[in-house]
Amino acid sequence: MKTYKLSRKTGHRKSLTRNLVTSLVLYETIRTTEAKAKSIVPVAERLITHARTGSLAARRSAKALLFDMNAVRKLFEDFPERYGDRTSGFVRLTKLPTRPGDQAAMAKVELLLTPLDAVIEQSTKTKLAVRKKDEAPSSEEDTK
């Protein structure tokens, strides 16, 4: 795994990562610099994957990483139901415009809210709607 040093010493970097991951679990979306966002995505992915097992060891390792017990509770009670059969891809990173003050590259990190089955079902409905629209005769042909 690639380590982003973020121009910080080890203790500060670990604390920053723990704070950002805790905020991501609690609020489900955070806005931060692109480098910080890229550094927390693998940590969050691994944490959610580990939490899906629901074991005591997984709960203890999550408790060691996250600062807030409400985040641990949410991670183990809500996320396994939400993600179901999804094996990876729990986190989305989206680039945003630069920050006005210092022109730092910004990014939004968010947890995917919909289960994989719902995403597949929605894309299927969209494809069917597009096909029906293409097959329907246009109104201009009927008037001639």
Image (tube, grey):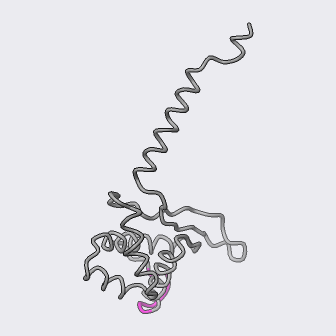
Q: How many marks?
A: 0
- Return the x and y of residue 59 as percentages of the image width and height: 31, 82
Q: Which image quadrant is residue 4 in?
A: bottom left
Residue 32 or 124: which is nearer the viewer?
Answer: 124
Question: What is the magenta segment's predominant secondary structure?
Answer: loop
Q: Is residue 7 magenta?
A: yes
- Return the x and y of residue 1 as percentages of the image width and height: 33, 72
> Where is the C terminus found, in terms of image quarters?
top right
Q: Residue at x 42, y 85 (%)?
A: 66
Q: Residue furthest right?
A: 143
Q: Is residue 109 magenta?
A: no
Q: Residue at x 50, y 72 (%)?
A: 37
| Magenta-tinted stretch | 5-11
In the picture shown, does residue 28 fall above or below 23? above
Q: Seen in the image, is 87 located left or right of residue 141?
A: left
Residue 72 or 45: which is nearer the viewer?
Answer: 72
- Return the x and y of residue 139 as percentages of the image width and height: 70, 17
Q: Which image quadrant is residue 140 in?
A: top right
Q: Seen in the image, is 67 located left or right of residue 143?
A: left
Q: Residue at x 40, y 53 (%)?
A: 116
Residue 11 or 53: which is nearer the viewer?
Answer: 53
- Return the x and y of residue 83 as percentages of the image width and height: 39, 61
